Image: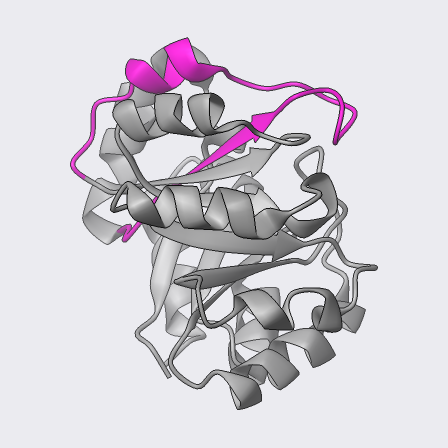
Amino acid sequence: MPRIKIAPSILSADLSRINQEIKEVEKYSELIHVDIMDGIFVPGTTIDLEFVKKIRTKVPLDIHLMVHEPSNFYIKSFIDAGAYSITVHEEACKYPFNQIKFIKRNNVKAAISIKPATSLDKIKKYTALVDMVLIMTVEPGWAGQKFIEATMPKVRELRRLKPHIDIEVDGGINPYTARVAFENGANVFVAGTSIFGKSDRVAAIKEILKGLK
């Protein structure tokens, strides 16, 4: 299985001091997870491109587009803003191959995501092309939700089919649920509230990591 990666989600951070927030977790983070919501694919909206341009960190930016039919121009704008990886949703794209291929052509890691109710069968045809699959463990759209353990069979099956791919889980991740996901095959853990909701962010990350050994 690929190595473990912790990806703090800035959705739960204090956005008014985002670079200081990220600075606190940089040493223990392999990725910084950045949620972009358009108010169409999901009910809410979040930060935008201009905000992403203000982020200053050497930790790779993991851009999660919860966006209906992101165009090449839209995707390229995040690539130009410093994205290391870009995730699109199977449910939000009519032809996900188009977005995935465009991301890959621009030398950025490509990922595809599915919501809790979406079958893994929907994305099996993309797994040879993407670098990572994001299995949502809550309904996308807002922070602080409860982990949906019924999503774990998808993680387990995907790990069996693709032993070397990065499998990311996002939603309700804390020390206990991270362990559950890890035991089923996940290796990339997006955590927002359980990191940025704590006064000692480093201790919070170490607590998650402790359960993954």
Residue at the image position 27 percent from the left and 24 percent from the top: 80
Identify whether 122 is placed above or below 191: below
Find residue 211 and report its image quarter. Answer: bottom left
Residue at the image position 52 percent from the left and 41 percent from the top: 192
Identify whether 101 is placed above or below 38: below
Residue at the image position 30 percent from the left and 74 percent from the top: 3
Q: Is residue 55 located in the magenta-colored stretch of the structure?
A: yes
| Span colored in magenta | 29-58
Query: Coloured how?
Result: one colour
Taking the image as shown, residue 149 lies to the left or right of residue 129, namely: right
Find residue 75 and report its image quarter. Answer: top left
Find residue 164 and report its image quarter. Answer: bottom left
Residue 213 is situated, as x and y percent measured from the top left of the image, at 36, 81
Q: Is residue 51 located in the magenta-colored stretch of the structure?
A: yes
Identify whether 153 is placed above or below 126: below
Looking at this view, is 61 or 120 the one in front? 120
Looking at this view, is 116 or 9 the one in front? 116
Taking the image as shown, residue 23 lies to the left or right of residue 176, namely: left
Residue 29 is situated, as x and y percent measured from the top left of the image, at 28, 50
Residue 208 is situated, as x and y percent measured from the top left of the image, at 44, 63
The reply to whether residue 17 is in sight is yes
Residue at the extreme bottom of the image, as rendered:
160
Looking at this view, is 198 or 84 the one in front? 84
Q: Main secondary structure of the magenta part?
A: loop
